[in-house]
Amino acid sequence: MSGVAEMSPKYLMEGALSAIPVGYKQSELGIIPEDWETKPLGELAEIYSGDSPSKFVFSTEGTPYFKVEQLNNGSVYADTTPYFIQSSKKVLAGSVIFPKRGASILSNKIRVLKHDSFMDTNLMALTCHHGLDELFLYNQLTYRGLDSVADTTSIPQINNKHISPYLVPLPRKAEQTAIANTLSDVDALISELEKLIAKKQAIKTATMQQLLTGRTRLSQFALLEDGTKKEYKQSELGEIPEDWEVISIGEALLAKSLVDQMDGNHGELYPKSHEFSSFGVPYIGATDFYSGKIDYKNCKYLPIQRANKFKKGIAKNGDVLFAHNATVGPVTLVETELDFIVISTTATYYRCNKDEIDNVYLASYFKSERFIKQFSSVMSQSTRNQVPILAQRKFLLVLPPVQEQTAIATILSDIDAEIQALEQRLVKTGQIKQGMMQELLTGKTRLIKPSKEVIHE
């Protein structure tokens, strides 16, 4: 990383009655270093707004043209877009681009143009003058948030009248660049972590496709006792290994391979809004495990006395949850130290006979292409997003012998653990960057020593 960080004396006082640290001053933006200035953006950058797409004919080459949705591509730079125009209108590479109206302002979609480009009417761009580093400006706007610029009284919007007087704290250019380079190093690390996570997820998807269909057999299960390779057979779901079976969920329940299947509570037992509390027994719906893990921090809770009144929808540790109403498709395993959790009418739990079905294998199978096709077919015949519990019982499971199920589940769980570790590292790195921004962009921590003339002896 660039420069050598020097922590400023936050708590040293110029006098017994002063609250401003030595080497700092009070400004319109709060306490900043004495050798920093505050200047309005109108003096530091040229302001540009875009034109409507209807004014242009798009082609496959020319000047890149950006809409708000293209700001989702990448984390710092606006680089890729499917739109190109043949026009003299362009904003220079290095300009900071961001939404100027609507909810996208609140999501802080700020990017730096990678190439000379143009944009539609919902976007605004700032081309920095010589005294302002574009990445320093990018980080200042990202740290302070577009909502600090915008008029948010009704529909959020940013106009020239908001941007021109907007004050930014301004160190010398060399310090701006040092700050920007340091934060860019962290951005590069974040980008590499995101790419690695995407790669691991792609590997998991491919591995699932191979192992859950039997196209790839684990070596310890691929051969017969005489050493010859096991063959394949035709089934209702296509070709599968000869020692695998296809069984419906309903048949698995009758055979006790699945011990239980149940959704949440209906009618009089359905909890009223005033019955929920901030602690107790988790009450889990489909949206509470949309990301693949139960969000215990943000889910609803019921007092234990109320939860004990439920006769159904009582899920336990190890059960597989499938979202079947409104939000359809998310799957997770129940992992809890509690005796039980309560599920809403939007989810179904499955409880496995561990001697015949591995619950991690079942959860993985519910995410597979074969299973998704089955519930998607039911959804296409409905006027709303739902897969009723009785319809689920017609769905077919592909089951290897339980030892092979467990081996497959272990491999997929190991990949999941790698992805989870990388995701946790990504979150931590993001938190580190946020802390660095707070220190560097306010001058609390200096990468370049202040000018001698402002240092107090």
Image (cartoon, grey):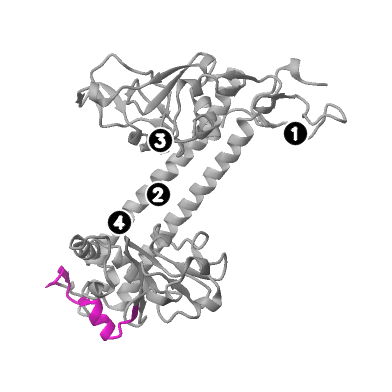
Q: Are marks 2 and 3 in contact (CB under 8 Å)?
A: no
Q: Secondary structure at mark 2?
A: helix
Label annotation for residue 10: 1
Residue interval drawn in magenta: 232-261
Q: Quarter holding the N terminus? A: top right
Q: Which of the two marks, 2 or 1, is nearer to us in this view?
A: 1
Q: Are marks 2 and 4 in contact (CB under 8 Å)?
A: no
255 displayed left or right of 33: left
274 displayed left or right of 365: right
The residue depicted at 45 percent of the width and 39 percent of the height is: 107
Q: Secondary structure at mark 3?
A: loop
Q: Quarter holding the C terminus? A: top right
Q: Which of the two marks, 3 or 4, is nearer to us in this view?
A: 3
* Relative vertical location of residue 388 with respect to residue 93 in this rendering, above or below: below
Find out whether residue 245 is within the magenta segment: yes
Gap in Å between the C-alphas at discs 2 and 1? Answer: 39 Å
Estimate how packed mark 4 is, as few (under 14), some (14 to 19) or many (20 or more) residues with alpha carbons within 10 Å: some
Estimate how packed mark 3 is, as few (under 14), some (14 to 19) or many (20 or more) residues with alpha carbons within 10 Å: some
> Can you identify the residue that label 3 sits on?
102
> Can you identify the residue that label 2 sits on?
197
Q: In the rendered image, which quarter is residue 258 located in?
A: bottom left
Q: Which of the two marks, 2 or 3, is nearer to us in this view?
A: 3
Gap in Å between the C-alphas at discs 3 and 4? Answer: 36 Å
Give residue 439's position: percent from left, percent from top. Answer: 64, 34
Residue 430, visible in the rendered structure: yes
Give residue 338's position: percent from left, percent from top. Answer: 53, 75
Find out whether residue 44 is within the magenta segment: no
Q: In the rendered image, which quarter is residue 28 located in?
A: top right
Label annotation for residue 205: 4
The residue depicted at 22 percent of the width and 62 percent of the height is: 379
Q: Which of the two marks, 1 or 4, is nearer to us in this view?
A: 1
The residue depicted at 49 percent of the width and 62 percent of the height is: 299
